[in-house]
Image (spheres, rainbow, N blue to C red):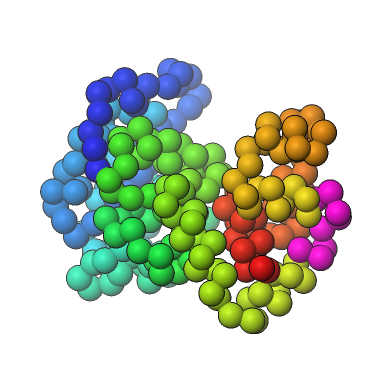
Amino acid sequence: MTIRTPDDAKRAPMTNAEQPIRVLAVDDDPMVLDLIRVMLKAAPDIELVATASDGDEVIGAVTAHHPDVVLMDVRMKRLGGIDATAALTKRPAAPRVIILTTFDEQEYVPRAMDAGAVGFILKSAASKALYDAIRDAHAGASPMSPQSVGHLRSGYLDGGGQSRGRARAMLEMLTDREREVAMLVAQEFSNPAIAKQLFLSESSVKQYVAAVQGKLGVEGRVGIATTVARAE
């Protein structure tokens, strides 16, 4: 993980009605937790409310501190981050979980998303990427490192017939236009690029993306890409 200048953390000042995004960081390396603490101090709209040193401490920490976003390590001594995420996201009003790890390994990405994580970024990412990931997750998006998007697709392409059949059935529920939009989202086209490709306005593309998410029952563009990858 790379520390940049405080300029990386800047955003529009909060209004009196806004509250900082509350974050819980979970990692069994004290040095990593210290680094996250230093980094998040530079972001005025993000507050580190607690840390935990292992996955089996997550439920207690969430109950005590009510974070909006959890930064979750993968490999820990007693309970790994993927199992901890699965246990946490089964609870009502669970916080959004971003898997934050050193290990750029393909198998973790689909497993983390199946466990309920909404994002997956590497600890080697610059501080700005961490700030943006927290903000995006809190806003309902699915932040992913560029490496992880490829791993997500590869992992689900190897996912087996049962998931493929279900994903294909879900895509059949879409209209032809919605399916076109879903395919372009899965190819990592931005909304402006989709609009240009399909001769639509950007506002129309946003409406189609929202409709696709609703019909598929997924969150964010990564959720759409996951379904498309499973169906292939």
Instruction: Name the magenta segment's main secondary structure.
Output: helix
Task: State the residue in front, 167 or 29.
Answer: 167
Spot the residue most to the front. 197
Q: Which image quadrant for residue 166?
A: bottom right
Residue 40, relative to residue 119: is it above or below? above
On the rendered structure, is 218 left or right of 2? right
Start-end of magenta stretch: 171-178
Residue at the location (50% across, 24% down)?
A: 17
Residue 201: x and y, percent? 79, 29
**The stretch drawn in magenta includes residue 174:** yes
On the rendered structure, is 47 left or right of 14? left
Task: State the residue in front, 15 or 108.
Answer: 108
Residue at the location (82% across, 58% down)?
A: 174
On the rendered structure, is 53 left or right of 161? left
Residue 213, relative to residue 39: is it above or below? below
Residue at the location (71% across, 77% down)?
A: 165
**Residue 197, visible in the rendered structure:** yes
Quadrant position of the C terminus in the picture: bottom right
Q: How many marks?
A: 0
**The stretch drawn in magenta includes residue 83:** no
Residue 127: x and y, percent? 30, 35
Q: Which image quadrant for residue 20?
A: top left
Residue 74: x and y, percent? 31, 63
**Residue 91, visible in the rendered structure:** no
Residue 158, relative to residue 89: is it above or below? below
